[in-house]
Amino acid sequence: MLDEPLLFDPATTGFAPVVTRLISKDPDIVCLDTCYSDYVHRIAKQLFQQGFKGQSISCTADFYDQMIAKTSEEFMEGFVFQFPDFDEPALNGEKINFTGRNGFSEAFNARHPGQLGAELLGIGSALVGDWPVVVIESGKARIKNFRAIPD
C-alpha cells in the first residue's frame, strides 16, 4: 500500500471526489476491501467514468450484472472478488460440501428474485475453509482458485 486507507463518511452518496482522490497517484490496483455493496457499485461506476484502467479487487461484487450494466463488460473484465454464483461449475468439486447447489440456486432465485438471502448467506454462514477467488470473465463470475486464509 502506498498510502493510508482512504476512509469516507458512511453517508457519502457522491463518490466522484472519493474516486478522484483514490486514483490521483495512478495506482495499478484499487482494493475496495470490505466496502458495502452499494459503495462498491458507486465506486466502480466512478472508476469507469474517470477512466481507471487498472485492476479492481473487492470482497464482494453483489449483483455484479448491475455493475456491468452501469460500466461495461470490458471494464469489469478481471474484477476479483470472493463470492461466486451458485451455478458456478467449480462448486461441483468434491471438496465442496453443498450437494444440489445448482438446484438450490434455481429454486432460490425463482422464489426470491433479485435478493441475496441474508438469512442463509449472512455473516453467520461465512465460516469456510477455502475461499473462492472469483474473477469476472466475459460478464460472468468464475472461480479461478480456492485459497485458505492461513495460506
Image (cartoon, rainbow, N blue to C red):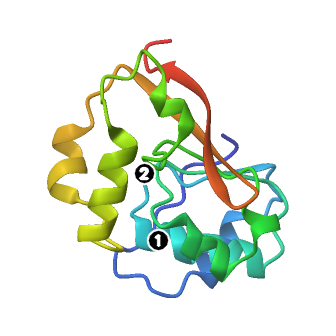
- Please say whether residue 140 is visible from this viewpoint: yes
Residue picked out by circle 2: 34
**Residue 113: x %, y % from top left:** 33, 74
Few, some or many residues within 10 Å of mark 2 (<14, 14–19, 20+): few
Residue 77 as seen in the image, left or right of residue 149: right
In the image shown, does 93 or 5 lie closer to the viewer? 93
Callout 1 secondary element: helix
- Check if mark 1's residue and mark 2's residue have beta carbons within 8 Å: no
Callout 2 secondary element: loop
* Residue found at the far top of this picture: 151
Which residue lies at the image location 50% right of the left edge and 49% below the top edge? Answer: 33
Q: Amino acid at mark 1?
A: Tyr
* Residue found at the far bottom of this picture: 14
Which residue lies at the image location 80% right of the left edge and 59% below the top edge? Answer: 25
- Reading the chain from its start, which is encountered first: label 1 or label 2? 2
- Please say whether residue 43 is visible from this viewpoint: no
Q: Residue 65 appears in which quarter of the rendering?
A: bottom right
| Marking on residue 27 | none
In the image shown, does 77 or 109 lie closer to the viewer? 109
In the image shown, does 68 or 58 lie closer to the viewer? 68
Q: Residue 68 appears in which quarter of the rendering?
A: bottom right
Q: Amino acid at mark 2?
A: Thr
Residue 148 as seen in the image, left or right of residue 70: left
**Residue 58: x %, y % from top left:** 54, 51
Establish if 50 lies above or below 35: below
Few, some or many residues within 10 Å of mark 1 (<14, 14–19, 20+): some
Residue picked out by circle 1: 39
**Residue 110: x %, y % from top left:** 31, 68
Which residue lies at the image location 36% right of the left edge and 57% below the top edge? Answer: 106
